[in-house]
Amino acid sequence: MEAPAPWRNALKAKLARGELVVSMIVRAARGPDIALVAHSSGCDALYVDLEHSPMSLETAGAICIASQAAGVTPLARVPEASAAWVARALDGGAAGVIVPHMEDAAAARAAVALAKYPPQGRRSVSTTLPQLAFRSLPGAQAHELLNRETLVVAMIESRQGLEQADAIAAVDGVDMLLVGAGDLAADLGVAGQPGHALVAAAFDTVIAACRRHGKAAGAGGLAGHPEALAQAVARGVRFVSAGTDTGFLLAAATAKVAAIRALGPSGAAGS
């Protein structure tokens, strides 16, 4: 039997080519079927949100494995940069981690160390992994491959993180800076206004830092603000978080119900 091709992180390759990639946030789904939904909708990636949901790591791993099989790159947003979250999310099948509330270069270096094997980091060794289809490879070969392909994303969500964006982008092993527009807007004093001029200026700062250091720039929290999103993409954002599974479900259900209601007698209301 011909040996399977080595694992490659398709999302990381697309970002390196400067392509615009789209991701879905998974918060409510608890089964692998959401991976096929992400694939059929055209998403390049999904990320299981372990920061803002009660989802277990076991469930997150099952979704990540299904996502990999479906051709959608799986990421995990962890609640904190600790081995208990970062290493276990990666061991469970995530192709990368999104680390929230990144505020300085030291925190970025610590996150990279948790996600990478020696000599680049201090991730604990696991002999078989979903990314490698559970094949056993020589340690040095496996670690070199996983260190190269695993994505590390630093979220910029505060004024302090924004001020340190250049230093964070300069950290070896950080692949992308992802602006969390909702949290950042709140910290900048314009809560609920991710399309505000202050947030737009913050995006410019982050995008410039990413360009200086050869990193990708991402946007979260702008999907409901098309003008602000269009501006961010035009200026260099290449990773877009398109929304949550619950948001997509509610939007589709609301539109469908409204269309059916419109077929009824004029002025009729539903119960």
Image (spheres, rainbow, N blue to C red):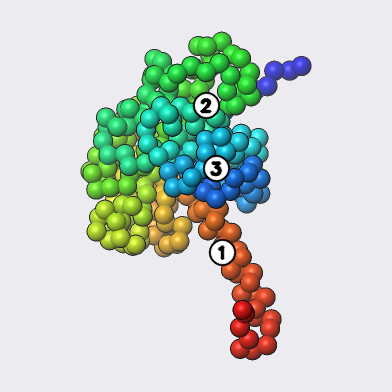
Q: Position of residue 49 (x, y in %)?
A: 48, 44
Mark 1 in CB contact with mark 3 (< 8 angstroms): no
Q: Which mark is residue 105?
A: none
Q: Position of residue 233 (x, y in %)?
A: 42, 52
**The one of 39 and 134 positioned closer to us in this rendering:** 134
Q: Residue 180, can we see it?
A: yes
* Residue at position x 45%, y 18% in the image: 124
Numbered disc 1: secondary structure:
helix
Per the rendering, the mark at residue 91 is 2
Looking at the image, tell me whether mark 1 or mark 3 is earlier in sequence order: 3
Crowding at dot 2, Cα within 10 Å, few <14 / some 14-19 / many 20+, comes out as: many
As rendered, which of 144 and 32 lies closer to the eye?
32
Residue at numbered disc 3: 45
Marks 1 and 3, how far apart at CA: 20 Å
Say if 269 sits above or below 144 in the image: below
Q: Residue at x 53, y 58 (%)?
A: 247
Which residue in the protein does label 1 denote? 251
- The nearer-to-camera label among 2 and 3 is 2
